[in-house]
Structure formats: C-alpha cells, structure tokens
Image (cartoon, rainbow, N blue to C red):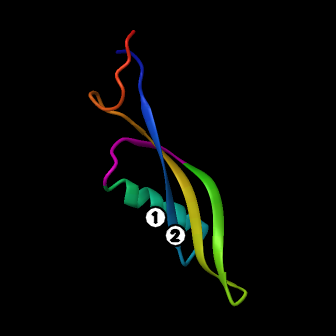
Amino acid sequence: MTGSIYKIIEIVGTSEKSWEDAVKNCVEKASKTVRNIRIAEVVLLDARIDKQKIVLYRARVRISFKLEEGEGPEFEE
C-alpha cells in the first residue's frame, strides 16, 4: 500500500488558567495513549461562567495521528 492514512479524533480539554492551557492539556493527555500525533486543530473555544467570572476554559480539539501498518481500513490499489 502506498501513501499514509490518518485518523482524527475530537476531544475536549479544560483549564482554570487559560484556553492555551486547555489545548495543551488535550495534547498531553492524548499523547499518553495515542501514538504518531501530527496535528492539533482547535475547533471551538468556550468558557464556563460563574458570578460574572470565567471559572473554566474549554477547548475542543481535533487530534490527527498517522495510522501504523495493520491499523485502520484496508484499501485495494
């Protein structure tokens, strides 16, 4: 088989500090169980508000990783 195949998953990270930290938390946590991460695409940023203040930053992130041989769908050439 020629070429590469990539899979995309979507996860949500949180932080009490910043959106940047929320994204960083996504990537760090995903990298503990997912190999070959190539791209982290921020899809959505939002925040939980309590008493007119941000109490939690949230980031929805698409993680793209390269499938290793033997993973994913088989294609015929």
Q: Is residue 38 magenta?
A: yes
Question: Which stretch is magenta?
Answer: 33-40
Asked whether the beta carbons under mark 1 and mark 2 sit within 8 Å of each other, the answer is yes
User: Is 10 rendered above or below residue 68?
Assistant: below
Residue at 69% from the left image edge and 90% from the top image edge: 51
Q: Report how far apart the C-alphas of labels 1 and 2 lie in the structure.
A: 7 Å
Q: Amino acid at mark 1?
A: Asn
Mark 1, other Cα within 10 Å: few <14 / some 14–19 / many ≥20 = some
Q: Is residue 46 left or right of residue 21?
A: right
| Among the two numbered marks 1 and 2 on one chain, the one whose residue lies closer to the N terminus | 2
For residue 30, side relative to residue 71 (left or right): right
Residue depicted at 39% across the width and 55% down the height: 30
In the rendering, at what x and y percent does residue 21 appear?
Answer: 53, 68
Name the image quarter holding the C terminus.
top left
Q: Position of residue 39 (x, y in %)?
A: 50, 43
- Dot 2 amino acid type: Thr
Query: Which residue in the protein does label 1 denote?
Result: 25
Q: Which residue is mark 2?
A: 14
Where does the image place residue 5, in percent across and percent down from the top left?
42, 28
The part of the image, by quadrant, that contains residue 71 is top left
